[in-house]
Image (tube, helix red, strand yellow):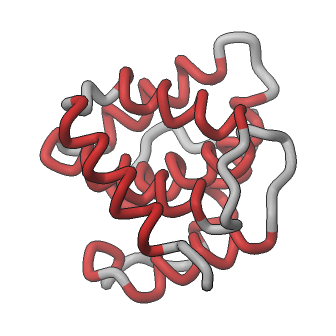
């Protein structure tokens, strides 16, 4: 993992979770990448974030997905870099990426389930977050 990060800033961790959802089905969709870039460009939590770091974080996620225990390692990095108060934010961003192309694929649903478990997202909160993502990304 030559171009991986040994630690993540809170914003890096949020980007890593979004990228993980995008690559979970091994088919990174343009709509998902656009969604990630749009969120990084417009959300207050990313106001001071260097957008060029997205590709470095993405490369780290890609490299970890190639490793046997990579998902565990990724969640370790995310939990180390992300304050607990931002766990639900991470889940909300992950849901927005998953919903960006209008279709939730099985691998994405499994990844969201994994994120819920790893970040101990309360089930009721998760349902509300998922509903919000669904209605934000619905098409006419």
Nearest to the observer: residue 57 or residue 36: 36
Among all residues in the image, which is located at the extreme right?
Answer: 27
Q: Is residue 139 left or right of residue 66?
A: left
Q: Position of residue 21 (x, y in %)?
A: 61, 46
Q: Position of residue 58 (x, y in %)?
A: 67, 54
Nearest to the observer: residue 38 or residue 96: 96
Instruction: Name the image quarter holding the N terminus.
Output: top right
Instruction: Name the image quarter holding the C terminus.
Output: bottom right
Nearest to the observer: residue 23 or residue 98: 98
Asked which quadrant contains residue 89, the reply is bottom left
Residue at x 74%, y 11% (from the top left corner): 68
Residue at x 60%, y 28% (from the top left corner): 110
Residue at x 59%, y 54% (from the top left corner): 98
Among all residues in the image, which is located at the extreme front?
Answer: 140
Q: Position of residue 24 (x, y in %)?
A: 71, 38
Nearest to the observer: residue 120 or residue 54: 120
Image: 117 above or below 68: below
Among all residues in the image, which is located at the extreme top?
Answer: 68
Q: Is residue 49 left or right of residue 67?
A: left
Image: 60 above or below 136: above
Residue at x 42%, y 54% (from the top left corner): 14
Image: 81 above or below 18: above
Number of marks in the rendered image: 0
Q: Position of residue 75 (x, y in %)?
A: 46, 28
Image: 115 above or below 85: above
Asked which quadrant contains residue 117, the reply is top left
């Amino acid at each position: 993992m030559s171009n991986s990060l040994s630690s993540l800033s809170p914003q890096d961790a949020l980007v890593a979770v979004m990228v993980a959802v995008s690559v979970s089905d091994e088919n990174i969709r343009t709509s998902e990448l656009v969604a990630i870039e749009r969120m990084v460009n417009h959300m207050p939590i990313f106001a001071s974030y260097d957008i060029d770091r997205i590709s470095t974080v993405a490369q780290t996620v890609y490299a970890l997905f190639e490793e046997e225990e990579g998902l565990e390692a990724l969640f370790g990095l995310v939990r180390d870099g992300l304050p607990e108060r931002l766990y639900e934010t991470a889940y909300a961003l992950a849901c927005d990426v998953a919903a960006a192309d209008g279709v939730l694929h099985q691998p994405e649903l499994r990844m969201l389930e994994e994120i819920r478990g790893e970040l101990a997202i309360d089930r009721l909160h998760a349902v509300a977050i998922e509903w919000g993502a669904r209605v934000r990304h619905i098409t006419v």
